[in-house]
Amino acid sequence: MAICDRHGLPVAVHVASASPYEPHLVLATLEARFLEDLPTRLIGDRGYDSDVLDGHLMDEYGIEMIAANRRGRTPMQDGRPLRRARRRWKIERLFAWLHNCRRVVTRWERHVENYLGMVQLACARILLRAFMR
């Protein structure tokens, strides 16, 4: 799981198995951030529409979670914050940049710590390219 800023640069990455529900990994990813500052808003898809996650992020971290409502659920937000969700392509671009590294695309490492190191190295490479321009 990854979190990026508004420019598509990585802010936090976290590696976990494929079985946990993604909203449960948000807090662990926030704890593994590269920077000291927390983001003010997080944008996610419909899977992140959860009252528990919204309350926990707002109460403990002061982060507003912006996610489209799941089907069959009463709308909790009006349309204004959801307009920011149109910028969700930036996280997809970050994953495309990460897929330029062969060691990240296919997990060759046996230990998760080694794989996380490769992902963090790929993020450092992305950040260096962005700041060297």
Image (cartoon, helix red, strand yellow):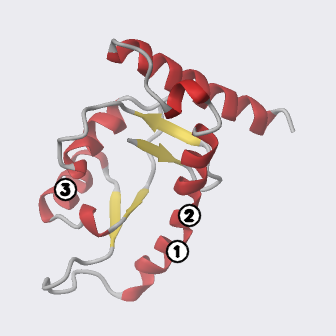
Amino acid carrying mark 2 in the image: Trp
Q: Residue 127 is drawn in which quadrant? A: top right
Q: Residues within 10 Å of mark 3 (few under 14, many from 20)?
A: some
Q: Quadrant of the N terminus?
A: top left
Q: Quadrant of the C terminus?
A: top right
Disc 2 vs disc 1: Cβ atoms closer than 8 Å? yes
Whether 13 is drawn above or below 39: the answer is: above
Amino acid carrying mark 1 in the image: Arg
Q: CA distance from mark 3 to mark 1?
A: 21 Å
Front disc: 2 or 3: 2
Residue 53 in the image, given as x and y percentages of width and height = 19, 56
Residue 119 in the image, given as x and y percentages of width and height = 51, 26
Pointer 3: what residue?
53
Q: Secondary structure at mark 2?
A: helix
Q: CA distance from mark 2 to mark 1?
A: 7 Å
Pointer 2: what residue?
89
Q: Residue at x 35, y 12 (%)?
A: 110
Viewer-closest of 17 and 73: 17
Q: Residue 76 is drawn in which quadrant? A: bottom left
Q: Secondary structure at mark 3?
A: helix
Q: CA distance from mark 2 to mark 3?
A: 22 Å
Amino acid carrying mark 3 in the image: Leu
Q: Secondary structure at mark 1?
A: helix
